[in-house]
Image (spheres, rainbow, N blue to C red):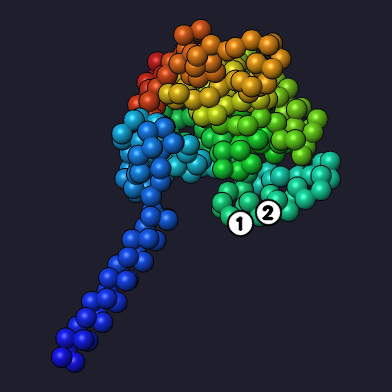
Amino acid sequence: MIIDKVKKINGEEKNKQKNEKAADMMIGKWVKCDNCKEILYKEELHQNLSVCPNCGKHFRLSSRRRIKQIADEGTFQEIGKDIVTKDPLEFEGYLKKVESLREKTKIDEAVKCGTCEIEGEKAVLAVMDGNFLMGSMGSSVGERITLAIETAIEKKLPIIIFCVSGGARMQEGIVSLMQMAKTSAALAKLDEAGLLYISVLTDPTTGGVTASFASLGDIILAEPKALIGFAGPRVIEQTIKQKLPEGFQSSEFLLEHGFIDKIVERKDMKSTIAQLLRLHK
């Protein structure tokens, strides 16, 4: 009888541990697709390039994962890492928030830039990251992207910019808005040099980024069902006092109206960019 009781206690303890482990998996290892409501195992989602296997929704990507998907392994050489967030307006709590975000996300700024190879083709790559202040464009973001463009001119390389942004960074006011002009001027010099610029719009690309370098690509690609626009739909509706068309500001709507050149699924993005680089050598 004592042995039976010990076995029962051990069995209950094992079941408890098993349930606790299952609970931990539900908290940290699963994610819900907000499109089809399917519960997905994170590791399987990552292996599928962060695309829902059930409905095809493209989840937002970190700059680190995006670079891993696009650049050939071991070829990405970061530039501009020493360009960090400043506080030109001495906005209360701004730098403290930035520092807290860096510790939490292990990301130092809302864009990562560098030289790389894409299927053997040399290029400059800039990837924005929505995990850092929603990819908002402050002075350091503008400076990093400008440096990437200038590097492309200096090395006579094409440049690819993956855009994701909530717009200008309000904590930097007019200094943030000035980055629109600076990046656009740098791209004008790239164009004069006869070099290729491919802009890739991902979800969401809005505000000052859309109104500047995101819209200036020689070729503009987009991921499926990405939100792309300047102001939000509600703001536009309230301003013009009209109901917007179905799917307004989606990449599909913009393709239909000639704003972008092609919608490319994530699994085809690297090969598509590589093909464009080879065609425009």
Task: Work out whether 250 lies above or below 49.
Answer: above
Furthest-bottom residue in this view: 2
Disc 2 residue crowd, few under 14, some 14–19, many 20+, Cα 10 Å: few
Q: Quadrant of the N terminus?
A: bottom left
Q: Image point 60% across, 17% down: which residue?
A: 216
CB under 8 Å between callouts 1 and 2? yes
Task: Work out whether 32 lies above or below 206.
Answer: below
- Residue denoted by label 1: 103
Position in image of residue 72 (x %, y %): 39, 38
Q: Image point 68% across, 43% down: which residue?
A: 83
* Alpha carbon distance from label 1 to label 2: 6 Å
Secondary structure beneath label 2:
helix
Along the horizontal axis of the image, is 239 left or right of 232? right
Disc 1 residue crowd, few under 14, some 14–19, many 20+, Cα 10 Å: few
Task: Work out whether 262 lies above or below 9.
Answer: above
Along the horizontal axis of the image, is 198 left or right of 214? left
Give the residue type that dot 2 points to: Glu
Image quadrant of residue 191?
Answer: top right
Q: Nearer the viewer, residue 154 or 244?
A: 244
Image quadrant of residue 132?
Answer: top right
The answer to whether one can see residue 73 in this image is no
Secondary structure beneath label 1:
helix
Give the residue type that dot 1 points to: Glu
- Residue denoted by label 2: 99
Along the horizontal axis of the image, is 59 left or right of 193? left
Q: Image point 19% across, 83% down: which residue?
A: 7
Q: Quadrant of the C terminus?
A: top left
Q: Nearer the viewer, residue 240 or 161?
A: 240
Position in image of residue 241 (x %, y %): 68, 11
The answer to whether one can see residue 53 in this image is yes
